[in-house]
Every structure is written in C-alpha cells, then in structure tokens.
Image: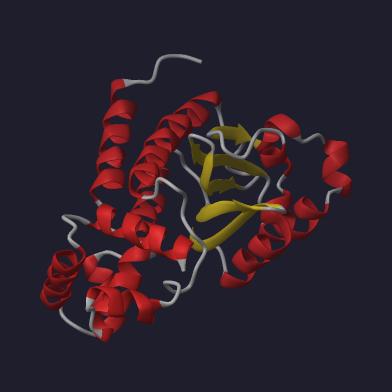
Amino acid sequence: MGILSPSKWELINSLVLIINGKGGLMEMRRAFLEELPRLIPCDRSFFLLGGTEEAGAVFFAPVYRNITEENMRGYIHDFASTNPSLRRQPLGECRVYRENEFINQTRLATDIFYNEWMFPQHIEFILGAKIAKDGILYGLINLLRTHEQGSFTETDEEVMRILSLHIAQRLHLRYPKGVQNRKRIQNADVLGERYGLTYRELDVCHLIFIGYSSREIAEKLLISENTVKKHTRSIFAKLGVKNRSNLIRIIHDFNETV
C-alpha cells in the first residue's frame, strides 16, 4: 500500500480530535460516522458497542447512518455474533477486514447473511473494524457500499486501521474493564444510599455510565445543560472523584460487587 497523502492525514487528524473531544459515547460515535465519509466514501455505516460472554461476542447500543431500525435490529439479533470475519481472529484483538477479501461468488449464492441482509439493501461490500485492546472487545464498526460505489481499497483499510486504534485507546482509557451491556446501574438504591446521592443524581450517574454527554443528558432528562453540570459536580464531590473516567470506574467496581 502506498503512503497516505498529506490531505488524508489532515482528515485523519481532524477525525481523531473528534474521537477524543466528544464527551459521550453516543455523541462520539454519531460524529464519527457523520465525518467518516470524507475519508472513506460509503453509503451506510454503523457502530456497535460490544463485549464478550460465555457464548462469545455480544453487540448492543447501535449508532447507525442510512440504515433502518428494523435492519439494524436484524443484524444485531441474527448476524452480528456469527460474523465470519470476527471468527477468524481472537475477539480481544483489534482487526480491520474487507469482506471482498473473503467472499467468493459461490458463497454469495448460498450465504444467509448476504442473501437476507446485504442484498435486500443493495449492499455488496463491507469494510469492518473490530475495536479491541489488551484482550477486551469494545465494539464493531461496519462501512457498507453498493455495487455502484465499488469495493473498498487497501488505502481505505489502512485509514480504518489507524482510526480504529485511536477509538480502541479512547474506550480502553474510559472503560478499562470493557463496556458493560447493562440498562441500569446494578442496585442503584444501594449506590445512592452509600454515597448520599439524590434520585436525580442517580439518573445523571446512570447516563454518564452508559456514555451520554452533558448535552445528551440534558435532552434526556428535560433539564438545562448547566443543571446537568451542577449535578455532575455534586456527584464527583460525594464520590471523591475528579472526572467522568474515575466515576465510571467506581460504578464498574460497584456493579461487580453487588
């Protein structure tokens, strides 16, 4: 593969700033998918959070672009954990792959995923990135192209590899034990009693825990962003932490002990 052009590096650096600058997981993933076509043209894309259980990989909390909710649910429920490209490598290793490297025409004629999920959406090519670091699976990114757009290139793959490493590092710093697929903090009333948190502070704690930014929390709870920041400062003081990363680590540890 050739050396990336200065203009490519400029766009990569701009996207890395977005990855590291957005406060919440949802906000970061949305911005990433919106900006990525400037670097790697694609019709559709999605970014799932993930982790491992006894049965293997699990994926959840989708953020997606130009894909219907029904198709996204179908992918997670029926196909994500059986992705053949994921099965080729250990789940805890970062890996970028192009489906057109693996798939031949004979398989395309018989494979359920390609016939029931890809082809009805006129998708022919996939560039995927398994996001992982130090043995921990964090998520999955897929970029999708039609026949008209053509297959992904080695340059596209290299750009995605660089970006996926930055994303893995960002997620690992915030969630060193992995992103947990939980709808609520476990036994939140016990956490509240232990640290003297109000019900509203517990709501804010939960949304910080699953990756919402202050702006997103404000929209979710129908309060101002300044009020969210006020609650956040109070939570930090009561738990004796200085930032969101430390708060999330405490909640992770709390969930594993209750």
Residue 64 location (% of width, % of height):
49, 60
* Apparent side of residue 31 relative to residue 146 in the rendered image (left or right): left
Residue 193 location (% of width, % of height):
29, 80
Residue located at (57% from left, 68% from top): 68
Residue 128 location (% of width, % of height):
57, 41
| Quadrant in which residue 97 is drawn | top right
Residue located at (15% from left, 74% from top): 225
Against 137, residue 53 (above or below) is below
Against 125, residue 248 (above or below) is below
Residue located at (41% from left, 30% from top): 162
Residue placed most toward the observer, 250 or 37: 250
Residue 257 location (% of width, % of height):
46, 63
* Apparent side of residue 255 relative to residue 151 in the rendered image (left or right): left
* Apparent side of residue 27 relative to residue 182 in the rendered image (left or right): left
Against 208, residue 218 (above or below) is below
Q: Is residue 155 visible?
A: yes
Residue placed most toward the observer, 170 or 80: 170
Residue placed farthest to the top in the image?
2
| Quadrant in which residue 96 is drawn | top right
* Apparent side of residue 117 relative to residue 59 in the rendered image (left or right): right
